[in-house]
Image (cartoon, coloured by chain):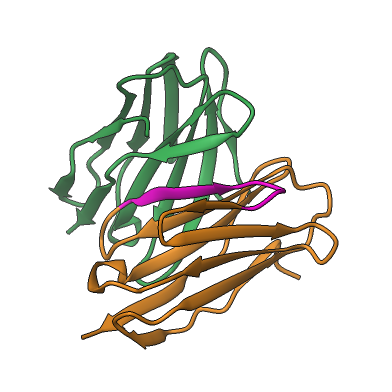
Amino acid sequence: RKEVEQDPGPFNVPEGATVAFNCTYSNSASQSFFWYRQDCRKEPKLLMSVYSSGNEDGRFTAQLNRASQYISLLIRDSKLSDSATYLCVVFGNQFYFGTGTSLTVIP
Amino acid sequence: GAVVSQHPSRVICKSGTSVKIECRSLDFQATTMFWYRQFPKKSLMLMATSNEGSKATYEQGVEKDKFLINHASLTLSTLTVTSAHPEDSSFYICSGLRGGPSDEQFFGPGTRLTVL
């Protein structure tokens, strides 16, 4: 079983839509959780860390469910500029990356 | 967020030559840096973990004599691809680990290596 699993998508959504991504992890001792955004042929950029209490940054909300071992990312009011690949990253004894979820926001 | 630079951004070389890639943390000290490679439409693959002042820890299947890593200071790590071959062509990305409670990684812009 992979350490981190993500639905690769692609997700194609209209502008203004709300879209949610989930990511599951296998190591219950994992300590830190992140969502990164990666544009084509660019490096990943940290979107947000995910805290146990959940956290929100503008249109983005991240949540962690330790009991079920998954994290989620919710994007509200999608913009064209949100089109990218979203990587789930989990840190236990090392960093583990999901394969990424591709999002395309359509005009 | 913190800033990590990588140089060069793109390199094309002949088979058999060695290529050196530099990774610098510009506004924080990174006792730990990571080196990844990424193939098109694939996720990042960790190659090695570089700790300042000590030998790098390589992932299984990564040849340490092929990919030489030196982490000479708290802000600089280098990756040298020795005797490069076409199959080494890839996108190489480094990251620095900014200490603190949240273990955040910040990535360099990557180096696209093409070996002819």
Q: Which chain is orange?
A: A
Residue B34 location (% of width, % of height): 49, 37
| Along the viewing direction, whichever of A5 and B42 lies nearer the viewer | A5
Residue lying at 44% horizontally and 29% vertically, measured from the top left = B69
Q: Viewer-proximal residue, A15 or B22?
A: A15
Please tell me whether residue B4 belongs to the stretch shown in magenta: no
Quadrant in the rendering for residue A12:
bottom left
Q: Report the residue at 47% width, 21% height from top.
A: B30
Quadrant of residue B8 in the image?
A: top left
Number of disc labels = 0
Residue B63 visible in the picture: no
Q: Residue A50, position in %: x, y?
A: 60, 49
Quadrant for residue A15, please give it: bottom left
Q: Which chain is green?
A: B
Residue at point 64%, 59% (across, down): A63
**x%, y% of residue B23?**
32, 30
Q: Looking at the image, is A70 positioned above or below residue B79? A: below
Q: In the figure, B11 relative to B65: above or below?
A: below
**Left or right, residue A60 beside residue A81:** right
Q: Nearer the viewer, residue A63 or A29?
A: A63
Q: Which of the image's four quarters has the N terminus of chain B? A: top left
Task: Give how far across and how far down residue B26 sits, in percent.
Answer: 30, 21
Residue B54 sits above or below residue B101 on the image: above
Q: Is residue A8 visible?
A: yes
Q: Which residues are magenta?
A: A43-54
Quadrant of the drawing holding the C terminus of chain B: bottom left
Residue B90 as seen in the image, left or right of residue B63: left
Q: Is residue B71 left or right of residue B55?
A: left
